[in-house]
Amino acid sequence: MIEQLSIPTAAGSFDAIAAGPEDGRPVLLLHGFPEAAVEWEHQVATLGVLGYRAVAPDQRGYSPGVRPEQASEYGIDDLVGDVLAIADRLGWNDFDLVGHDWGGAVAWWTADAHPGRLRSLAVVSTPHPAALAEAMKTDEDQHLRSAYMTEWRQTRVTERRMLDDNAEALRRIFDWKVPPSKVEEYVQRLSEPGALTAALNWYRAGRPGGKIGPIEVPTLYIWSTEDAAFGSTAALDTANRVTGPYRFEMIEDVSHWVVEEAPEAVTSLLVEHLSSH
């Protein structure tokens, strides 16, 4: 059974879904844009049945209780701080961290800054940030794939464009790969006053000030071949950015929305990863 949680922190109260025994091995799962914690419901439910304590929060801006107005309050340090604040509130000294899309970026940065808190790391879609930055500079294909980020940093204009005509542009982002009921839920959530601006503030907060180094915790990286956002250059280079035990898995003929398009495959790889570390 999936539970609904409210996790109070100094930044505000995060909504979350959870499953599994309270004393189970803790796993925290971070969603991407423009989704929410329910992106992970298949994985959370399965991990719970297997005896893990799986928790997926609606992150900063997505939880109504943690929705600051200024874009500057969505920087990577704030997002990593939220991860630790949630873990602390849950009483987790160390935990396994999983992320997709923007949640994957936050997971990489958390593993870099606080390796002692993580038993393992699993990232879906998003390459190591240094590999992505290098690819954006040297690989024309990745540069073109990432062009949308510049557009989405334009304040207010993007919100109107995404929500016009019954949120047609927002729906199209999912490329008909995500179940319609999920898309409806995401659109409904992001149509609430201020919600889409808060989600887009992740892009508008500015680039991280520091440099991210090699990752030393055991890492699983899952990339799908039809990912429109992340090409093979950064995906393959990610191996050079991990010094700890590393596993790279490529899922063929699946889009960026791999967590929901191929939930069984992602869950199976995640369970294998967790059971081996």
Image (cartoon, helix red, strand yellow):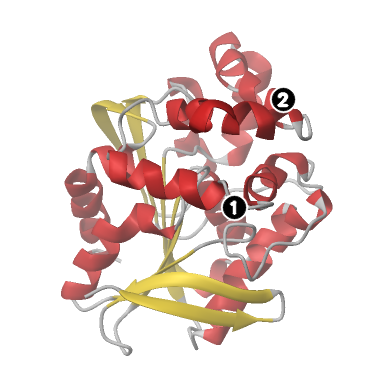
State the residue at coordinates (46%, 22%): 231
Hey, what amino acid is under mark 2? Answer: Thr
Indicate left or right for 226 with 129 as reference.
left
Quarter of the image holding residue 97?
Answer: bottom left
Q: Position of residue 212 (x, y in %)?
A: 67, 47
Q: Quadrant of the N terminus?
A: bottom left
State the residue at coordinates (74%, 46%): 211
What is the spatial separation of the Cα atoms under label 2 and label 1, in whole angstroms? Answer: 24 Å
Helix, strand or loop status at disc 1 = loop
Question: Does residue 116 appear in this view?
Answer: yes
Mark sitting earlier along the chain (2/1): 2
State the residue at coordinates (66%, 52%): 193
Helix, strand or loop status at disc 2 = helix
Residue at label 1? 192
Indicate left or right for 89 with 197 as reference.
left
Question: Mark 2 or mark 1: which is in front?
Answer: 1
Indicate left or right for 9 with 249 as reference.
right
Q: Position of residue 159 (x, y in %)?
A: 67, 35
Mark 2–mark 1 CB contact (< 8 Å): no
Q: Position of residue 122 (x, y in %)?
A: 39, 54
- Which residue is at the far front? 165
Q: Total of numbered circles in the picture?
A: 2
Residue at label 2? 150
